[in-house]
Amino acid sequence: MQITEKENYKILKDEKGDLTAFADELTKRHSDFKEYNLVVNLLEHKNLSSEQLLMFLEIAMIHFNEKKSFVIVKDNIEIDKVPEDLIVAPTLREAEDVINMDELQRELGL
């Protein structure tokens, strides 16, 4: 797993090309990331279906309940087939915007 630290979030990227193993590793290592907003970069997974994103639903919900953002970055996804509990952005820049908006809402108590 490649980890890139930004000002108020971390970008996690699969280095092995095995989405299932990546999701499992992320779930197992959740305690390492629970204090950070996370961006999961899946742009290199070309033939990814909306259903495959469900592997990240549990960790996304845990993060949400801990008042942290969890954003998946993947383009070419049928967004209407993705559960509302998963936040998907088509670019890293848009993922950063989502996190910034979430942080602002949390600061305002919304």
Image (spheres, helix red, strand yellow):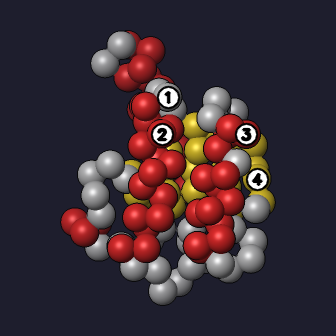
Q: Secondary structure at mark 2?
A: helix
- Whole-percent x, y for residue 60 in the image: 46, 47
Give, as a three-letter code, the residue at label 3.
Answer: Asp
Mark 4 vs mark 3, foreground winner is: 3
Task: Please tell me which of labels 1 and 3 falls first in the chain.
Answer: 3
Mark 4 vs mark 1, foreground winner is: 1
Give, as a three-letter code, the residue at label 2.
Answer: Ile
Q: Quadrant of residue 26?
A: bottom right
Q: Residue at x 59, y 63 (%)?
A: 23
Q: Secondary structure at mark 1?
A: loop
Q: Is residue 73 above or below residue 87?
A: below
Q: Is residue 91 above or below residue 58?
A: below
- Tell which of 75 and 109 is nearer to you: 109
Q: Is residue 60 above or below residue 13?
A: above
Q: Which residue is tagged 3?
A: 32
Label 1, residues with CA under 10 Å away: few <14, some 14-19, many ≥20:
few
Task: Please tell me which of labels 2 and 4 falls first in the chain.
Answer: 4
Q: Which residue is tagged 1?
A: 66
Label 4, residues with CA under 10 Å away: few <14, some 14-19, many ≥20:
few
Q: Residue at x 40, y 64 (%)?
A: 54
Q: Quadrant of residue 21?
A: bottom right
Marks 1/2 in contact by CB < 8 Å: the verdict is yes
Q: Which residue is tagged 2?
A: 62
Q: Residue at x 62, y 62 (%)?
A: 24
Q: CA distance from mark 2 to mark 3?
A: 13 Å
> In which quadrant of the rendered image does the N terminus lie?
bottom right
Can you tell which mark lies on residue 3? 4
Left or right side of 44 for 69: left
Marks 2/4 in contact by CB < 8 Å: the verdict is no
